[in-house]
Image (cartoon, helix red, strand yellow):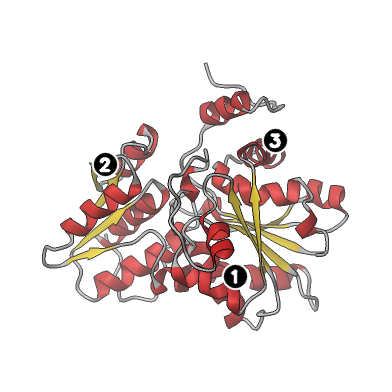
Amino acid sequence: MPLDPSAPTTLHIQTPLLLHRRLAAALGKPVWLKMENAQPSGSFKLRGIGLLCQRAVAAGATHLVCPSGGNAGFAAAVAGVALGVQTTVVVPVTTGEAVRRAIADIGAALIVHGAAWDDANGEALRLCSAPGTVYIPPFDHPDIWDGNATVIDEALQQALLSVPGDMPFDVVICSVGGGGLLCGVLEGLHRNGLAHVPVIAVETEGAASYAAALAAGEPVTLAAITSVATSLGARRVAQAAFDWHRRHDIISVVVSDAAAVDACIRFADDLRVLVEPACGAALAVAYGDMPPLRRFSRPLVIVCGGIGCDLATLAALQKKFALPSSIQSPP
């Protein structure tokens, strides 16, 4: 039975907060992991997109349309099915077949359109001219940021139970694509009285639209996305994400594809969990003990997850970058 969209029930779940004991021992300080890979959609996206979909349906939407490279669309599909409304996800041809199947298999309509997300977005906007149809952006909407902020609400409550009487984390590390997670993390910090806690915002080379915006003094559009971390492939970061740097301490870090993939492999070895290179970017800061991290004593890493990674993909990336690994491609 579909959920009542006006009810207080959330579509996302509370995810575990784990201490990465091996990294903690190596770095000499606790390293906390907020395991958003455990969401029903496989990534943090269900928090914000789920809330946006829920509010849209409560306001009368009968058809949800989301342009996506993968994770946002899958989250919209999960939300649409739970809410009992027609959901269409528009993806570009670059979206992998496994991700396409995952979206279609749970009951969403799938349209493959264009060579890049911008093309898929144009088609999604065209479809939204029909009555009752609501556009669900992948990252740029206040409801999405409001929903994503719950990751900090939860992490703070969980961490205070683990470390009573002490501030459990003094920096948050998160990956940045279009800026939806970054905006949510920042909103969550401010609404919990943690405006003093810096954020390390991590991108990969070839998908660093946030770093490009900071360098230019305004959001700019990248000519192309060349990183293997395709989930970070927003050619232009949201204006709201850029604006936050004027009122919060945000440390921009850009890592190589190889570092992001290496972090995915090491994370799989350590935690027996697969995540996308987009998520590996944030983990790479901790695994590499990168200089921006060294002045902090209690980092919290948002393990954003992602459905676009499997053993074969990770093994191929390991081979591409000539990285050591115990991961073997399945026969």
Whether 139 is drawn above or below 106: the answer is: below
Q: Which quadrant would residue 158 be assigned to in this image?
A: bottom right
The residue carrying pointer 1 sits among few (fewer than 14), some (14 to 19) or many (20 or more) residues within 10 Å by Cα, namely many
Whether 104 is drawn above or below 8: the answer is: above
Q: Which mark is residue 152?
A: 1
Q: What residue type is labelled 3?
A: Asp
Q: Label 2, label 3: how many angstroms apart (C-alpha)?
A: 37 Å
Q: Of residues 130 and 192, which is closer to you in this image?
A: 130
From the viewer's perspective, is 19 left or right of 38? Answer: right
* Rendered residue at 57%/31% (across/down): 314
Q: Which quadrant would residue 258 be assigned to in this image?
A: top right
Whether 136 is drawn above or below 40: the answer is: below
From the viewer's perspective, is 72 left or right of 183? Answer: left
Which badge, 1 or 3, is on the more N-terminal residue? 1
Which badge, 2 or 3, is on the more N-terminal residue? 2
Q: What residue type is labelled 1?
A: Ile
The residue carrying pointer 3 sits among few (fewer than 14), some (14 to 19) or many (20 or more) residues within 10 Å by Cα, namely some
From the viewer's perspective, is 228 left or right of 133? Answer: right
Q: Of residues 323 and 267, which is closer to you in this image?
A: 323
Residue lying at the far right in this picture: please name it: 28
Q: What residue type is labelled 2?
A: Gly
Q: Quadrant of the N terminus?
A: bottom left
In this rendering, the label closer to the viewer, 2 or 1: 2
Q: Label 2, label 1: how many angstroms apart (C-alpha)?
A: 36 Å
Q: Label 1, label 3: how many angstroms apart (C-alpha)?
A: 27 Å
Report if residue 146 is visible in the image: yes
Reading the image, the residue beneath label 3 is: 269
Q: Position of residue 39 (x, y in %)?
A: 49, 54
